[in-house]
Image: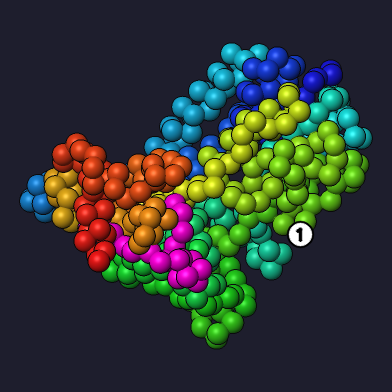
Amino acid sequence: MHFDAIVIGSGPGGEGAAMGLAKAGLNVAIIERESSVGGGCTHWGTIPSKALRHAVSRIIEYNQNPLYCKNNTTLHSTFSQILGHAQDVVNKQTRMRQGFYDRNQCTLLFGEASFTDSHRIAVKKTDGTLEHYSADKFVIATGSRPYRPDSVDFTHPRIYDSDSILRLKHDPRHIIIYGAGVIGSEYASIFKGLGVKVDLINTRDRLLEFLDNEISDSLSYHFWNSGVMIRNGETYEKIEGTDDGVILHLCSGKKMRADCLLYANGRTGNTDLLHLDNVGLTPDSRGQLSVNQNYRTDVEHIYAVGDVIGYPSLASAAYDQGRFVAQAIAYGSAKGQLIDHIPTGIYTIPEISSVGKTEQELTRDKIPYEIGRSQFKHLARAQIAGTDVGSLKILFHRDTKEILGIHCFGERAAEIIHIGQAIMEQKGEGNTIDYFVNTTFNYPTMAEAFRVAALNGLNRLF
């Protein structure tokens, strides 16, 4: 009943921590409140939403390809139909991750965890019984959940958040998505790709304003061109559920009616049920914990990783944080740290991915930069695949030619960005735009966009 370390949560952060601790020779237990491992990333977040997105993008690709549609035959699926594909992927991921714990001899405990004192924890089983365990060290990797304001009735059968939308049974003709962040924008793409009328309510002045302005504008135009109605700078006064749908009352006086509403405006850390007051920890207003460079909280033997500590709130970063916290516990300090330039991957249709500085940031900091661009429509591979919507933009220093930022909009953007990221991570003279000019790329490929953009940028120098 006593372990060297107990990890609470089996998402990417918890998995990274548990694997690292087990490989370091520690006796490790993982507590998971759901009936299978994987956490929110696998069951409600990254994996199912990206599986849905992939299915919809393939439908769109088929329907827009004249080779397949010359007889005016088109594919059509509903949201509830493609949910089956997403669940198949979730099941495969769960089985694979279960195998990781089994091979590394980690003890899996299923139930709701809560601290009883600084070194003891209670696990509430599904039948209501309690089991008690103790450990020398703890890692909190409980992730986050959709923010649910008290003024919204999420018990209404037509009002969803980004978790409950995966249980959608009916097939809406019209959906309102409140919140135009990453999650809201991704689901706007999915529903619009299925032919559903979409109203996207953005509480900010522009879509995904943390992006480079040109990329944000590209997404806005693509949404507009596909029929998504975007309402910028709006907040709700009241969300009213009816027998057959939802009426959204905006503070600006506008009213909208739809078959259902997806509320996707923020997330909060899963710390409310941990009884952290029993160990002297107090989360902030968003349920998040503060940590030091070794991911240690204000309590010496308790650590935290992933969404529960805030930025960057990415599954990829959470896994790395888990590995680093395992090093900190096993060896006294983390041997690694997150890289400076973590790429963003936004799985709208088309995708968006960025790494490094935006034009706005470079202009603000008065850094002399130049721009190299390539349009996907000019690439042979994109023409062959019929994925010619999109572009790649490289920002580089005029004098040193150092790559400062890369921004991509288009199919496979989240894959394409890694080529540029690898060069950006090189130190000194290894990180220059000349690499893309002096390297021979496979032809035809989407990676060739880097060579085209580099040549375009160098031609602007004088």
| Left or right for 460, reference 264 | left
Q: Secondary structure at mark 1?
A: loop
250, above or below 442, in the image: below
Q: Which quadrant of the structure image shows residue 64?
A: bottom left
Q: Residue at x 16, y 39 (%)?
A: 443
In the image: residue 214, left or right of residue 7: left
Query: Residue tagged by mark 1?
Result: 285
Q: Dividing the image into 4 quarters, which one contains the N terminus?
A: top right
In depth, the one of 352 and 78 nearer the eye is 352
Colouring method of the image:
rainbow
Is residue 17 in view from this perspective? yes
For the record, the magenta segment spans 354-376
- Residue 350, above or below 175: above
Q: Nearer the viewer, residue 220 or 237?
A: 220
Which residue is depicted at the point 62% across and 23% down? 19
Query: Residue 452: image x %, image y %?
Result: 21, 52
Where is residue 133, by image quadrant?
Answer: top right
Left/right of residue 269 with respect to residue 65 in the rendered view:
right
